[in-house]
Structures are given as C-alpha cells and as structure tokens.
Amino acid sequence: MPAVLLRTGHFLKTEVLIGLNQDEWTYFLVYGAPGYDITSQNLISREDFLKGVDLVLPGFSDVRRETAIFQYTDWTVH
C-alpha cells in the first residue's frame, strides 16, 4: 500500500529533517542509571553526577568527558 501511494502521489507533502548524531544513543543511557527516576525531579550530588558521566561515557577521552561535565553542570548553583 505505501508503494502504491508513493507511486500515485497520494501522500501529504511535508518538510522532513533527516540527519544523525554520533553517539546520540548515550543520551538514553541515563534512564538506566542507578538512582535515576524519570517520573520525578531528582537532585543528585556532584559526586554522583561525576560517577554518572563515567558510567555513560566509558572509554571516552578526558576532553570529551570534561566537555559533557561542563555542558551539563548547573551553573546557577556552582
């Protein structure tokens, strides 16, 4: 059926954004991190945050880990 619709032009024309990001999958690993609860706002200690970075970015260079730490640090409290 989709092939017929495509061939006959019976489909909605819309804009589509297509792309990929290297290591995008690491974003979803946080949901499996110990102590993380997606249904509520959890405030974790700086120590737990740093352990979490090592947990989700194993084998990454120090520069990449430090970049992630900088990006996700709550600068309103640090």
Image (spheres, rainbow, N blue to C red):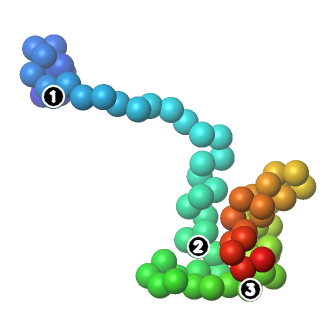
The local crowd at label 1, few if under 14, some if 14 to 19, many if 20 or more residues have their Cα within 10 Å, is few
The answer to whether 58 is drawn above or below residue 18 in the figure is: below
Real-space CA distance between mark 3 and mark 1, rounded to the nearest whole angstrom: 49 Å
**Is 51 on the left or on the right of 3, as rendered?**
right
Q: Nearer the viewer, mark 3 or mark 2?
A: 3
Q: Residue at x 77, y 63 (%)?
A: 69
Disc 3 or 2, which lies upstream in sequence? 2
Local secondary structure at mark 3 = loop
**Callout 2–callout 1 Cβ contact below 8 Å:** no
Residue 28 falls in which quadrant of the image?
bottom right
Local secondary structure at mark 2 = helix
Position of the C terminus by quadrant: bottom right
The local crowd at label 3, few if under 14, some if 14 to 19, many if 20 or more residues have their Cα within 10 Å, is few
Which residue has dot 3 on it?
45
Q: Is residue 9 visible?
A: yes
Disc 3 or 1, which lies upstream in sequence? 1
Residue 35 falls in which quadrant of the image?
bottom right
For the residue marked with disc 1, what is the amino acid?
Answer: Leu
Residue 37: image location, x then y, percent:
52, 82
The answer to whether 63 is drawn above or below residue 30 in the figure is: above
For the residue marked with disc 2, what is the amino acid?
Answer: Gly
Q: Residue at x 84, y 58 (%)?
A: 66
Which residue has dot 1 on it?
12
Residue 51: image location, x then y, percent:
79, 75
Q: Nearer the viewer, residue 32 or 18?
A: 18
Q: Residue at x 90, y 55 (%)?
A: 62
**Is 57 on the left or on the right of 5, as rendered?**
right
Which residue has dot 2 on it?
32
The answer to whether 15 is drawn above or below residue 70 in the figure is: above
Position of the N terminus by quadrant: top left
